[in-house]
Image (spheres, rainbow, N blue to C red):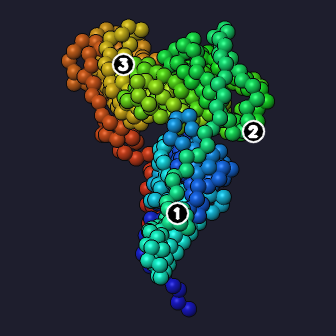
Amino acid sequence: MSRTRSPPTTVVIASLLVVSAVAGAPAAVAQDGPPPTPAAYFGDITIDGEPAPEGVEVTAYVDGERRGSLTTTQPGAYGGSSAFDQKLVVEGTSDDAGATVEFRVNGEVAATDEAIEWEPGEVRRVDLAVGDGSDGSDGSDGSGGSGGSDGSDGSDGSSGSDGGDGSDGSGGSGATSGGAVAPPPTGDTVETTTASVEMANGTATLSAGSVAADEVVEAELPAEAAASNATLVGLSVSPSSEILSFGTDVTPMAPSAMPDDVRDHEDAEVVSVFEIAPTTFDSGDVETAEIRFETEMSAFSDAESPEDVSLYRYVDDRWRELPTTYEGDGTYVAETPGLSYFAVGGPQSDVSVAEASLGAAEVAPDAETEVAVRLRNEGDAEGSTNVGLRIDGELVADRTVTIPADATRRVTFTPRFPEVGEYDVVVGSTEVGTVSVVESASDDADSGDGDGSGAAGEDAATESTGGGSGELPLEGFGIGLTQVVGLVSLLLVVAGGFLLLRRE
């Protein structure tokens, strides 16, 4: 009986599959991060060519998943362009960027003028139409008068033939049987209630009477409702159900004054915090609210433009970015689905010493050794930091390094140690180690000396990016531990395959 030999191709394919599986693992992890800002939409709605009545449910789907919904409060429209108008907020992930958004009206797929692609933070007008408006073509019946024996009647009929334009009603014009085009709907004005505001002990108390679900409560806040670096100037609340007595406290505070059970924001530079707390109803009774605030760019260290500034809401033990619109002159408007703690923030750098090492722990008198420092910026904005080298507590060298977002830089110092003794080396707040200066230091230890010839602490430093040849072990080769394991696995599988072939 003959045995079937495994062709070399099979061994190679199996090896590649092993390496691909191992090397692909870090990529999946790298996609984790804070959720992107939701998109928001508003516009007109027509059903069979007529303005949709109020109380219509509008929903949005991305990749077949329901991502947002609202119920209209006026005929012919959902939401509005004003910063204080309701909008359809559609959640998404970083993978959804460019995905098609499908809109439905009362469960029926709605037509749009063009395909709508989901983009984080976008606020956009999208008009929706369901059914058809072909009823407007009935206006063409007027042309029958042109066949009348009475010439004058016939002329009247020919005027009616202009109603043929009503056939455009299939596009939603909603023309009547007489051939005239109906004027566009104006919609009902949403009833607005202005809340009274009283300041006491740094807190603004907003009060109003009974508020129905289709009403909006608005309040302008005094200058006293200001925290460090930002001022809350206006609040608009649309309840999801009737509120018998409206009461809300607004308290500005410094970021350091937040309660201990509120976590620090790790992904943004927070310059101001506000607590907006309902006192006579629950946050869940809010359909939507809009917050108007003012701040200056000088309050931020790393934000480069007003568009970088956002309002964040604290909910479910984490900070979530809200759709924020810059209106100019330092004024912003943000939309929120509920009330809680709010933070005014911008992108920030997060530079720290990731690793530091000594070139040699023992040197001869008047010799140098290298102090290698790897700096890492974990933030989402470019940042600068001053790196100081201290020997026995004395600052002997420093330099300022600028690092792009999510990148690394390598800095080296070459201090000289003139006298015999023990020297503690510290970079920033990181203890690097102790250098021993002895008369009998070996030539090998001396070989760690740098090329610089300056006095103690002189910086012959170099900088390189995260993937450069100047990186510390492993990273200097542009690979990580996982890739090393994958390469070793490949070599073992290939060697085993060829040994198996030789036996056969």
Disc number lying in front (2 or 3)? 2
Can residue 383 be seen? yes
Residue 221 lies in what quarter of the image? top right
Q: Nearer the viewer, residue 186 or 198?
A: 186
Could you tell me residue 194's position as x and y percent?
64, 25
Element class at badge 3: strand
- Judge whether 169 appears above or below 441 on screen: below
Which residue reaches farthest right?
A: 244
From the viewer's perspective, is the residue at label 1 or at label 3 nearer?
1
Q: Residue at x 33, y 24 (%)?
A: 401
30 vs 264: above or below: below
**Residue drawn 36% across the image and 24% down it:** 384
Q: Amino acid at mark 1?
A: Ala
Residues under numbered marks 2 and 1 in contact, where contact means CB atoms less than 8 Å apart: no
Q: Residues within 10 Å of mark 2 (few under 14, many from 20)?
A: some
Q: CA distance from mark 1 to mark 3?
A: 71 Å
Relative image position of residue 396 (x, y in whole percent): 32, 11
Return the residue at label 3: 386
Q: Quadrant of the N terminus?
A: bottom right
Q: Residue at x 49, y 60 (%)?
A: 181
The kind of residue tagged 3 is Asn
Q: Is 89 above or below relative to 441? A: below
**How packed is label 1: few (under 14 Cα within 10 Å), some, or many (20 or more)?**
many
Q: Are marks 1 and 3 in contact (CB under 8 Å)?
A: no
Q: Earlier in the sequence, mark 1 or mark 3?
A: 1
Under circle 2, the secondary element is loop
Specify whether residue 376 is in view: no
Q: Which mark is residue 175?
A: 1
Mark drawn on residue 241: 2
Residue sitting at x 48%, y 43%: 123
